[in-house]
Amino acid sequence: MKIFLLLLIYTLPFIYASSQTVDPVNWDDQFVIVDKNGGAFHSYYEGVEGHPYFIEKFMYASISLSTGKMYNGVKARIDLYKQEIHFRLPSDSERIALPGLITEIIFYDTVESGTYSYTFQAGYPEIDNLKRDNYYQVLSDGELQLLKFTTKEITEEKNVQSGEISKKFITREEYYTFCNGEIKKFKKDKDGLLEMMRDQKEKIQDYFKDKKINFRNISELINLFDYYNSITGKKPF
């Protein structure tokens, strides 16, 4: 695997399409990655089956920076193996955002059935060896956020007959909640949910009776969190 050299000339910001700023953008003032021969950056992993991205293709995205600036119309994707956000420039070259710079990124994916959005946020307290600059997907937003942390790992398998070793990416997912500045591992059980939503306990109990939700079904849990957040009417930050 090629050894990457990191060349850094630090200025802000670094996006070419903005909805809330008219600052000129210099694409040379970025975190530039090239290989040891000075060639174009190649973001795949040699000899590993699959890819490290949430969605492999570049999608249009909106981003919020730690500086408070916001930008739209950015082509980006997120590397879940390295927890990095990659951008495609108009020149078709690729750059990587500095750790801690992006606090939120919303990807927009258009398919035949419609347009879907996926929101990722960073800046949460540390938990389970996860750092503040790790990105969580926000499944439900409001006073009580439901979060999913997805990582991709490289596993090795040995062919019993040939002895050859193959590598591939596998996906692991964990769920968390965030409320009042505290992040917790999410346990999918009724008693735990009632405790988290105790300020609306009667309404949540009525919801359970009406919906008879499957606590292993994440879509039904998202609907529950959305309902709770709709009746509290509060934001998490």
Image: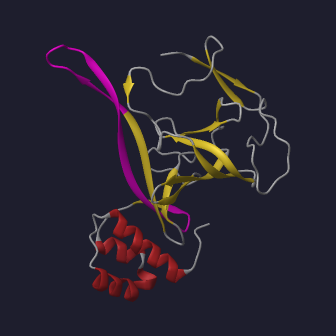
> Looking at the picture, does residue 216 appear above or below residue 197?
above
Furthest residue in direction top, as rendered: 37
Looking at the picture, how far across and down is residue 47, in whole percent?
A: 39, 20
Of residue 18 and residue 124, the one placed in the foreground of this image is 18
The image quadrant that residue 142 belongs to is bottom right
- Colour scheme: secondary structure
Q: Residue 187, percent across and down? A: 33, 63
Residue occupying image coordinates x 76% and y 53%: 69
Task: State the residue lying farthest toward the front.
Answer: 112
- Residue farthest to the left, as pictured: 161
Is there any visible trace of residue 130 in the rendered image? yes
Task: Out of 25 and 231, give the one closest to the viewer.
Answer: 25
* Residue 79 rendering spot, x and y as whole percentages: 51, 38
Give, as a single range, the part of the protein colored magenta.
154-182
Asked whether residue 43 is drawn in magenta, I would say no
Q: Is residue 167 magenta?
A: yes
Instruction: Give me the residue at 59% from left, 72% from top.
Output: 235
Residue 29 x/y as whole percent:
78, 32
Residue 81 relative to residue 157: left or right: right
Which SS does the magenta portion mostly show? Answer: strand
| Res. 128 visible in picture | no
Q: Which residue is drawn at the image coordinates 61% and 13% (left, top)?
A: 36
